[in-house]
Protein backbone atom coordinates (compact mmCIF):
# COMPACT_ATOMS: atom_id res chain seq x y z
CA UNK A 1 0.00 0.00 0.00
CA UNK A 2 1.28 3.43 -0.96
CA UNK A 3 0.62 6.80 0.66
CA UNK A 4 1.25 10.22 -0.90
CA UNK A 5 2.55 12.58 1.76
CA UNK A 6 5.14 14.41 -0.36
CA UNK A 7 5.46 14.78 -4.15
CA UNK A 8 8.77 12.94 -3.88
CA UNK A 9 6.93 9.83 -2.65
CA UNK A 10 6.53 9.21 -6.39
CA UNK A 11 9.61 8.44 -8.45
CA UNK A 12 10.05 10.46 -11.64
CA UNK A 13 8.99 7.36 -13.59
CA UNK A 14 5.83 6.96 -11.46
CA UNK A 15 5.15 10.67 -11.77
CA UNK A 16 5.40 10.55 -15.54
CA UNK A 17 3.07 7.52 -15.66
CA UNK A 18 0.56 9.36 -13.49
CA UNK A 19 0.64 12.47 -15.70
CA UNK A 20 0.26 10.31 -18.81
CA UNK A 21 -2.82 8.69 -17.26
CA UNK A 22 -4.25 12.11 -16.38
CA UNK A 23 -3.80 13.24 -19.99
CA UNK A 24 -5.50 10.04 -21.18
CA UNK A 25 -8.44 10.87 -18.89
CA UNK A 26 -8.61 14.38 -20.37
CA UNK A 27 -8.85 12.88 -23.85
CA UNK A 28 -11.53 10.28 -23.01
CA UNK A 29 -13.17 10.80 -19.58
CA UNK A 30 -16.08 8.45 -20.34
CA UNK A 31 -13.66 5.51 -20.51
CA UNK A 32 -12.93 5.96 -16.79
CA UNK A 33 -16.47 6.71 -15.58
CA UNK A 34 -16.99 3.49 -13.59
CA UNK A 35 -13.51 2.27 -12.65
CA UNK A 36 -14.10 3.05 -8.94
CA UNK A 37 -17.66 1.73 -8.73
CA UNK A 38 -18.23 0.52 -5.16
CA UNK A 39 -15.18 2.39 -3.80
CA UNK A 40 -15.36 5.18 -1.22
CA UNK A 41 -13.14 8.23 -0.69
CA UNK A 42 -13.04 9.88 2.74
CA UNK A 43 -12.17 13.60 2.75
CA UNK A 44 -10.92 14.63 6.20
CA UNK A 45 -10.51 18.41 6.04
CA UNK A 46 -9.51 19.95 9.35
CA UNK A 47 -8.88 23.26 7.55
CA UNK A 48 -11.08 25.22 5.09
CA UNK A 49 -10.79 24.38 1.41
CA UNK A 50 -12.80 24.92 -1.75
CA UNK A 51 -10.83 23.66 -4.74
CA UNK A 52 -8.89 20.84 -3.13
CA UNK A 53 -11.80 19.23 -1.29
CA UNK A 54 -14.32 19.65 -4.11
CA UNK A 55 -11.85 18.52 -6.77
CA UNK A 56 -11.14 15.35 -4.78
CA UNK A 57 -14.86 14.73 -4.46
CA UNK A 58 -15.47 15.51 -8.14
CA UNK A 59 -12.61 13.18 -9.09
CA UNK A 60 -14.07 10.24 -7.15
CA UNK A 61 -17.58 10.89 -8.44
CA UNK A 62 -16.24 11.10 -12.01
CA UNK A 63 -14.70 7.65 -11.48
CA UNK A 64 -18.04 6.21 -10.35
CA UNK A 65 -17.14 6.06 -6.65
CA UNK A 66 -18.69 7.57 -3.53
CA UNK A 67 -17.53 10.14 -0.97
CA UNK A 68 -17.85 10.78 2.75
CA UNK A 69 -16.07 12.99 5.24
CA UNK A 70 -16.07 16.39 6.93
CA UNK A 71 -15.12 19.90 5.85
CA UNK A 72 -13.88 21.40 9.13
CA UNK A 73 -12.40 20.26 12.43
CA UNK A 74 -15.44 21.69 14.24
CA UNK A 75 -17.71 19.21 12.49
CA UNK A 76 -15.56 16.20 13.46
CA UNK A 77 -14.65 14.46 16.70
CA UNK A 78 -11.45 16.52 16.69
CA UNK A 79 -13.60 19.13 18.44
CA UNK A 80 -13.93 16.61 21.28
CA UNK A 81 -10.18 16.03 21.37
CA UNK A 82 -9.90 12.90 19.19
CA UNK A 83 -6.42 12.39 17.76
CA UNK A 84 -5.64 12.07 14.05
CA UNK A 85 -4.34 8.56 14.74
CA UNK A 86 -7.65 7.44 16.26
CA UNK A 87 -9.71 9.16 13.54
CA UNK A 88 -7.86 7.40 10.73
CA UNK A 89 -8.16 4.02 12.46
CA UNK A 90 -11.92 4.44 12.40
CA UNK A 91 -12.12 5.90 8.90
CA UNK A 92 -10.04 2.97 7.58
CA UNK A 93 -13.04 0.72 8.25
CA UNK A 94 -15.42 3.07 6.42
CA UNK A 95 -13.56 3.97 3.23
CA UNK A 96 -11.07 2.61 0.69
CA UNK A 97 -8.87 5.72 0.41
CA UNK A 98 -8.51 8.99 2.32
CA UNK A 99 -7.50 12.60 1.59
CA UNK A 100 -6.56 14.64 4.66
CA UNK A 101 -5.87 18.36 5.08
CA UNK A 102 -4.60 19.59 8.43
CA UNK A 103 -3.14 22.87 9.74
CA UNK A 104 -0.37 21.01 11.61
CA UNK A 105 2.67 19.99 9.60
CA UNK A 106 3.17 16.24 9.70
CA UNK A 107 -0.43 15.32 10.56
CA UNK A 108 -1.03 13.39 7.29
CA UNK A 109 2.23 11.51 7.90
CA UNK A 110 0.98 10.52 11.34
CA UNK A 111 -2.30 9.39 9.78
CA UNK A 112 -0.44 7.21 7.27
CA UNK A 113 1.37 5.41 10.11
CA UNK A 114 -1.94 4.25 11.62
CA UNK A 115 -4.00 3.80 8.45
CA UNK A 116 -4.93 0.57 6.71
CA UNK A 117 -6.01 2.48 3.56
CA UNK A 118 -3.99 4.78 1.27
CA UNK A 119 -3.61 8.31 2.68
CA UNK A 120 -3.20 11.37 0.46
CA UNK A 121 -1.85 14.58 1.98
CA UNK A 122 -4.21 17.35 0.84
CA UNK A 123 -2.08 20.02 2.53
CA UNK A 124 -0.39 20.19 5.94
CA UNK A 125 0.32 23.66 7.31
CA UNK A 126 3.10 25.41 5.40
CA UNK A 127 4.82 22.13 4.58
CA UNK A 128 3.51 20.13 1.61
CA UNK A 129 0.63 20.03 -0.86
CA UNK A 130 1.47 17.16 -3.21
CA UNK A 131 -1.76 17.02 -5.21
CA UNK A 132 -1.51 20.74 -5.96
CA UNK A 133 2.00 19.99 -7.19
CA UNK A 134 0.66 17.20 -9.41
CA UNK A 135 -1.92 19.68 -10.73
CA UNK A 136 0.82 22.22 -11.45
CA UNK A 137 2.99 19.64 -13.20
CA UNK A 138 0.08 18.45 -15.36
CA UNK A 139 -0.73 22.05 -16.29
CA UNK A 140 2.85 22.76 -17.34
CA UNK A 141 3.29 19.43 -19.16
CA UNK A 142 -0.01 19.70 -21.02
CA UNK A 143 0.36 23.35 -22.05
CA UNK A 144 4.15 23.56 -22.47
CA UNK A 145 4.72 20.01 -23.67
CA UNK A 146 7.64 19.43 -21.28
CA UNK A 147 8.83 19.52 -17.68
CA UNK A 148 12.47 20.26 -18.46
CA UNK A 149 14.40 23.20 -19.93
CA UNK A 150 12.29 25.73 -18.04
CA UNK A 151 12.90 28.92 -16.07
CA UNK A 152 10.27 29.06 -13.35
CA UNK A 153 9.57 32.15 -11.26
CA UNK A 154 7.81 31.98 -7.89
CA UNK A 155 6.36 35.28 -6.67
CA UNK A 156 4.89 36.32 -3.32
CA UNK A 157 4.82 34.29 -0.13
CA UNK A 158 7.70 31.87 -0.52
CA UNK A 159 8.20 31.40 3.22
CA UNK A 160 4.83 29.86 4.10
CA UNK A 161 3.66 28.79 0.63
CA UNK A 162 3.42 24.98 0.76
CA UNK A 163 2.51 24.85 -2.93
CA UNK A 164 5.81 26.57 -3.73
CA UNK A 165 7.84 24.24 -1.52
CA UNK A 166 6.26 21.14 -3.05
CA UNK A 167 6.63 22.30 -6.66
CA UNK A 168 10.29 23.23 -6.22
CA UNK A 169 11.02 19.76 -4.86
CA UNK A 170 9.23 18.09 -7.76
CA UNK A 171 10.65 20.21 -10.59
CA UNK A 172 14.19 19.98 -9.18
CA UNK A 173 14.27 16.36 -10.36
CA UNK A 174 13.96 17.34 -14.02
CA UNK A 175 16.80 18.44 -16.30
CA UNK A 176 17.79 22.05 -16.96
CA UNK A 177 15.42 23.72 -14.53
CA UNK A 178 16.22 27.18 -13.19
CA UNK A 179 14.30 28.99 -10.46
CA UNK A 180 13.80 32.71 -9.85
CA UNK A 181 12.50 33.54 -6.35
CA UNK A 182 10.63 36.86 -6.17
CA UNK A 183 9.73 37.95 -2.65
CA UNK A 184 10.30 40.53 0.07
CA UNK A 185 13.06 39.72 2.55
CA UNK A 186 10.52 38.65 5.19
CA UNK A 187 8.94 36.02 2.90
CA UNK A 188 12.08 34.49 1.33
CA UNK A 189 12.20 30.79 0.57
CA UNK A 190 13.02 28.82 3.77
CA UNK A 191 16.63 27.94 4.43
CA UNK A 192 15.98 24.19 4.30
CA UNK A 193 14.61 24.51 0.73
CA UNK A 194 17.71 26.41 -0.37
CA UNK A 195 20.18 24.09 1.34
CA UNK A 196 18.56 20.65 1.06
CA UNK A 197 16.98 20.91 -2.39
CA UNK A 198 18.60 23.70 -4.39
CA UNK A 199 22.19 23.87 -3.15
CA UNK A 200 22.57 20.15 -2.50
CA UNK A 201 21.41 19.27 -6.03
CA UNK A 202 23.23 22.18 -7.70
CA UNK A 203 19.98 23.68 -9.02
CA UNK A 204 20.56 27.21 -10.38
CA UNK A 205 18.41 29.88 -8.78
CA UNK A 206 18.39 33.56 -8.01
CA UNK A 207 16.49 35.69 -5.51
CA UNK A 208 15.15 39.08 -6.59
CA UNK A 209 12.88 41.69 -5.05
CA UNK A 210 11.20 43.23 -8.13
CA UNK A 211 8.78 41.26 -10.29
CA UNK A 212 9.55 43.57 -13.23
CA UNK A 213 13.21 42.51 -13.14
CA UNK A 214 12.37 38.80 -13.30
CA UNK A 215 9.37 38.48 -15.59
CA UNK A 216 11.11 38.87 -19.01
CA UNK A 217 13.22 35.72 -18.50
CA UNK A 218 10.46 33.39 -17.28
CA UNK A 219 8.76 30.47 -19.00
CA UNK A 220 6.43 29.99 -16.01
CA UNK A 221 5.32 32.60 -13.47
CA UNK A 222 3.81 31.02 -10.36
CA UNK A 223 1.97 33.69 -8.37
CA UNK A 224 0.96 33.17 -4.74
CA UNK A 225 -1.09 35.12 -2.24
CA UNK A 226 0.29 36.33 1.06
CA UNK A 227 -1.57 34.03 3.44
CA UNK A 228 -3.19 35.82 6.36
CA UNK A 229 -3.78 32.53 8.19
CA UNK A 230 -0.01 31.86 8.40
CA UNK A 231 0.77 35.18 10.14
CA UNK A 232 0.83 35.68 13.89
CA UNK A 233 1.08 39.45 13.49
CA UNK A 234 -1.74 41.15 11.54
CA UNK A 235 0.31 44.33 11.10
CA UNK A 236 3.01 42.32 9.29
CA UNK A 237 0.36 40.76 7.05
CA UNK A 238 -1.16 44.14 6.16
CA UNK A 239 2.28 45.57 5.40
CA UNK A 240 3.23 42.72 3.06
CA UNK A 241 -0.04 41.61 1.45
CA UNK A 242 0.09 44.02 -1.51
CA UNK A 243 3.82 43.74 -2.21
CA UNK A 244 3.31 42.17 -5.65
CA UNK A 245 0.39 42.71 -7.98
CA UNK A 246 0.52 41.29 -11.50
CA UNK A 247 -1.31 43.55 -13.94
CA UNK A 248 -1.59 44.03 -17.70
CA UNK A 249 1.33 46.46 -17.77
CA UNK A 250 3.70 43.93 -16.18
CA UNK A 251 2.44 41.25 -18.57
CA UNK A 252 3.77 43.32 -21.50
CA UNK A 253 7.28 42.53 -20.21
CA UNK A 254 6.74 38.76 -20.41
CA UNK A 255 7.41 36.29 -23.20
CA UNK A 256 4.53 35.61 -25.57
CA UNK A 257 4.35 32.00 -24.41
CA UNK A 258 4.94 32.50 -20.67
CA UNK A 259 2.26 30.82 -18.54
CA UNK A 260 0.84 32.37 -15.36
CA UNK A 261 -0.13 29.81 -12.72
CA UNK A 262 -1.72 30.36 -9.31
CA UNK A 263 -2.90 27.71 -6.81
CA UNK A 264 -5.90 29.92 -5.88
CA UNK A 265 -7.65 31.45 -4.05
CA UNK A 266 -6.58 34.77 -5.50
CA UNK A 267 -7.01 37.89 -3.40
CA UNK A 268 -5.55 40.89 -5.24
CA UNK A 269 -2.11 39.68 -6.35
CA UNK A 270 -3.40 39.19 -9.92
CA UNK A 271 -5.50 42.02 -11.33
CA UNK A 272 -8.77 40.79 -12.95
CA UNK A 273 -7.66 42.36 -16.24
CA UNK A 274 -5.02 39.62 -16.54
CA UNK A 275 -7.75 36.94 -16.69
CA UNK A 276 -8.36 37.76 -20.37
CA UNK A 277 -4.72 37.20 -21.30
CA UNK A 278 -4.34 33.75 -22.96
CA UNK A 279 -1.18 33.23 -20.90
CA UNK A 280 -3.25 33.27 -17.69
CA UNK A 281 -4.07 29.60 -17.11
CA UNK A 282 -4.96 29.44 -13.40
CA UNK A 283 -8.62 28.57 -13.95
CA UNK A 284 -7.66 25.89 -16.46
CA UNK A 285 -5.13 24.74 -13.85
CA UNK A 286 -7.99 24.19 -11.38
CA UNK A 287 -9.74 21.96 -13.92
CA UNK A 288 -6.56 19.95 -14.43
CA UNK A 289 -6.65 19.30 -10.68
CA UNK A 290 -9.69 17.06 -11.09
CA UNK A 291 -8.03 14.95 -13.79
CA UNK A 292 -4.78 14.46 -11.90
CA UNK A 293 -6.63 13.48 -8.72
CA UNK A 294 -8.66 10.97 -10.75
CA UNK A 295 -5.38 9.48 -11.98
CA UNK A 296 -3.91 9.41 -8.46
CA UNK A 297 -6.95 7.69 -6.95
CA UNK A 298 -6.81 5.07 -9.71
CA UNK A 299 -3.11 4.43 -9.14
CA UNK A 300 -3.42 4.14 -5.35
CA UNK A 301 -6.47 1.87 -5.55
CA UNK A 302 -4.78 -0.12 -8.35
CA UNK A 303 -7.80 0.04 -10.66
CA UNK A 304 -7.69 0.27 -14.44
CA UNK A 305 -10.11 1.08 -17.22
CA UNK A 306 -11.38 -1.89 -19.19
Image (cartoon, rainbow, N blue to C red):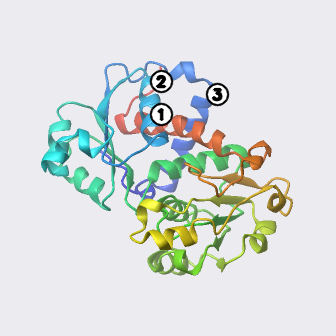
| Residue 234 screen position, x and y as percent | 45, 68
Q: Quadrant of residue 173?
A: bottom right
Residue drawn at the location 27% of the way across and 32% of the way down: 96
Q: Is residue 269 left or right of residue 122?
A: right
Neighbours of disc 3 within 10 Å: few (<14), some (14-19), many (20+): few
Compare residues 250 and 190 and report the one nearer the observer.
Answer: 250
Q: Quadrant of residue 254?
A: bottom right
Q: Which label's residue is closer to the chain start, 1 or 2?
A: 2
Q: Quadrant of residue 158?
A: bottom right
Up the image or down, 282 lies above or below 97; here it is below
| Residue 24 screen position, x and y as percent | 60, 31
Q: Which label's residue is closer to the chain start, 2 or 3?
A: 3
Disc nearest the viewer among 2 and 3: 2
> Mark 1–mark 2 contact, CB under 8 Å?
yes
Q: Kindly report the distance in space between the C-alpha atoms of the residues bearing marks 3 and 1.
A: 13 Å
Q: Kindly report the distance in space between the C-alpha atoms of the residues bearing marks 2 and 3.
A: 14 Å
| Residue 268 screen position, x and y as percent | 63, 55
Callout 2: SS: helix
* Residue 27 tag number: 3
Q: Kindly report the distance in space between the C-alpha atoms of the residues bearing marks 1 and 2.
A: 8 Å
Residue designated by label 1: 294
Residue drawn at the location 76% of the way across and 57% of the way down: 247
Compare residues 147 and 161 and report the one nearer the observer.
Answer: 161
Residue designated by label 2: 62
Count of marks overlaid on the render: 3
Q: Which label's residue is closer to the chain start, 3 or 1?
A: 3
Compare residues 268 and 188 and report the one nearer the observer.
Answer: 268
| Residue 159 screen position, x and y as percent | 49, 71
State the quadrant of the N terminus.
Answer: top left
Amino acid sequence: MKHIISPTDLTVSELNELLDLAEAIIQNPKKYANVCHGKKLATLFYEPSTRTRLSFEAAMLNLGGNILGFSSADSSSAAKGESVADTIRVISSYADICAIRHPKEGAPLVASLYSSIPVINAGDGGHNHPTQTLTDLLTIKNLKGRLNHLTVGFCGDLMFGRTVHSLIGALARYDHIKFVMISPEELRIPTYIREEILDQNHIPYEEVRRLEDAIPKLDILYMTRVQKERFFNEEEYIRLKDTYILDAKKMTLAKEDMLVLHPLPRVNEIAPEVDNDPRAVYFKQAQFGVYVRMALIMKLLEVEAC
